[in-house]
Amino acid sequence: MKIIHDYQCEVCQEVTEFYVDSKDQSKKVCPICNGYCTKVFLPQKRDTVDAPWISTVLEVVEKGSDKPHCNEFLKHPTRANYNTWKNKEGVRHLEQGERKSKNDNTFKKAQMKKELHRRYREREAVSI
């Protein structure tokens, strides 16, 4: 299972999020100074809640795009990069009680996302 973990750089002390396997104990390279980062545990975060959700968003992001925000989010799927991608692509969450309009681009993207999820579930289904 992949989850988001915080890693702190041994050189610049910057804390960065990485999307990693839950048992991964390797050091990561700091995106700021290229120093080594070690895993830190911050009790206020609930990283396992975000991981499945972010992995579904990664399926929708354009692969091989020339857009820097898409490539950065694919390379480093953190909450900050997700928000940047969401803003640059013009995607937003619906407010509570807000209805989807069939003429709204958000509705079309939601339909596409549902279809992608359906295909993913079919592909990953296990027959017994």
Image (spheres, rainbow, N blue to C red):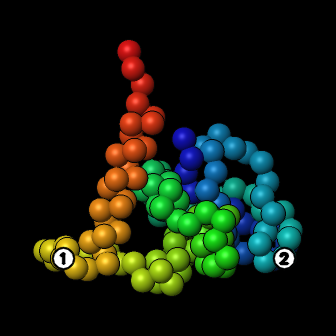
Above or below, 74 against 92 in this view is above
Task: Tell whether label 2 touches label 1 (CB within 8 Å).
Answer: no
Observer able to see residue 76: no
> Is residue 60 toward the left or the right of residue 93 in the image?
right
The vertical placement of 127 against 68, above or below, is above
Q: Quadrant of residue 94?
A: bottom left
For the view shown, which residue lies furthest in the top direction?
128
Helix, strand or loop under label 2: loop
Position of residue 85 in the picture relative to residue 74 (left or right) = left
Q: Nearer the viewer, residue 65 or 56?
A: 65
Per the image, the residue denoted by label 1 is 101
Q: CA distance from mark 1 to mark 2?
A: 46 Å
Q: Report x, y in % for residue 40.
A: 66, 58
Q: Is residue 96 left or right of residue 127?
A: left
Q: Amino acid at mark 1?
A: Ser
Image point (84%, 76%), residue name: 33
In the image, what residue type sits under mark 2?
Cys
Residue 34 drawn above or below residue 18: below
* Circle 1 Cα neighbour tier, 10 Å, few/some/many (<14 / 14–19 / ≥20): few
